[in-house]
Amino acid sequence: MNQYICKLCGYIYDEAAGIPESGIPVGTRFSDLPEDFVCPLCGVGKDEFALLGETTDQVEQDLSADHKPSLDDYSDMQLSAICSNLARGLELQYKPVESALFRDLAAYYKDRAVPVSEPSFDKLMSLVDRDLNELIGKTNEIAKAHEDHGAQRALVWNEKVTKIVKSCLTRYQAGGEAFLDDKNVYICSICGFIFLGDKVPEMCPICKVPSWKFDTVGKR
Amino acid sequence: MAKYAVRNIRLCTKDCLCLYVCPTGATDWENGQIDVETCIGCGDCADACPSAAISMVPFTYPRQQPRKTEVVTVMNELFQSKTEQESIASELPGRLGAAIARANRLMAEDLNREAGFMLPQSDNVKSLLREMLDDPADDFPADKVRELLKRL
Ligand code: SF4
Ligand code: SF4
Ligand SMILES: [Zn+2]
């Protein structure tokens, strides 16, 4: 069963639902609607309707260059992050049901991800250093060469937040848990910037969102 | 492109112009939301709202910008590194471990968004969901994946 949208006013004809009050039974295919069928909202004819989904001008684009991801490329933890990212996207689109479904999938993949053996601050630090000294620079070069501005923007934020993470780890290594005693831990819910202090920052210095986008981590 | 109006309750000050300008009464609904069925997508309420609380949301989204395989491959390497750091940090005690785990999750999300998973309605997402359906695990929530494929 498909849905057809009126290109003029946005009315959606749902084949599964039909329009029983106008004598169109449940399950009536769009193609089986009478030729003189008109949009019940704005009155245009059948040829002003399009199959709901991707519009025609999108299909005509050249897609040969587009990368096609495949499930095998990702670990469970990565799938979890892909799903939680999509959940956030659907929240922005005001689609709470779809967003919750992706949240559930994200939680499922996170739960079944194999834990890292012997996790430690040192191990974390070595990955942070590899990102800062190697991966981010290499990725940035390739993104630049291909003029991928979205990727470059993400890498700017990534580098800054990774440096903040490194500075937190360094202070922790020097002073242990105690260096946090008199501080709150705030995190920017958009970019991940971590701020240790008394008061929430007025604006995120990295992604520039206002203070209400910050969350407080735990209690001191 | 056909659109409908949505009100962000958090920004809305509850009593002003959108009620007067709407030709169909869609902005004045008992649940505080704008009624999708009644809204004809004219955009007058969004123009009139002094608090920028109303967005005009399209029924269909344009196709995403194509991504180059070279870029995606190396972005995925960094993405993988961030998820590994999230795993380690979430095993560590204290508020710092929790904050670092969260920061890495947010960075990982940003990276995969820019490496092919921007739009939930895209072909990339749909084909990934279809592949998920072959997951052999007994407890895999295939019903949720099917529901998503139906709705997106
Ligand atoms: S877009 Fe037009 S019809 Fe829809 S709620 Fe706003 S004013 Fe009313
Ligand atoms: S005009 Fe904007 S702020 Fe005022 S009631 Fe309508 S949505 Fe809310
Ligand atoms: Zn930020």
Image (spheres, helix red, strand yellow):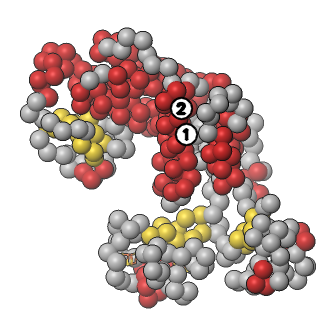
CA gap between label 1 and label 2 equals: 6 Å
Per the rendering, the mark at residue A105 is 1
| Relative to B58, residue A157 above or below | above
Dot 2: few (<14), some (14–19), or many (≥20) neighbours within 10 Å?
some
Q: Position of residue A143 (x, y in %)?
A: 53, 29
| Relative to A212, residue A70 above or below | above
Dot 1: few (<14), some (14–19), or many (≥20) neighbours within 10 Å?
many
Q: Quadrant of residue B88?
A: top left
Q: Is residue A71 left or right of residue B30?
A: right
Quadrant of the rendering where the C terminus of chain A is positioned: top left
Provide the chain ID for the residue under circle 2. Answer: A
Q: Quadrant of residue B138?
A: top right
Amino acid type of the residue that numbered disc 1 sits on in the rendered structure: Leu
Disc 2 marks which residue?
A109
Observer-nearest residue: B45 or B142?
A: B142
Q: Is residue A153 visible?
A: yes
- Looking at this view, name the residue that lies furthest to the front: B138
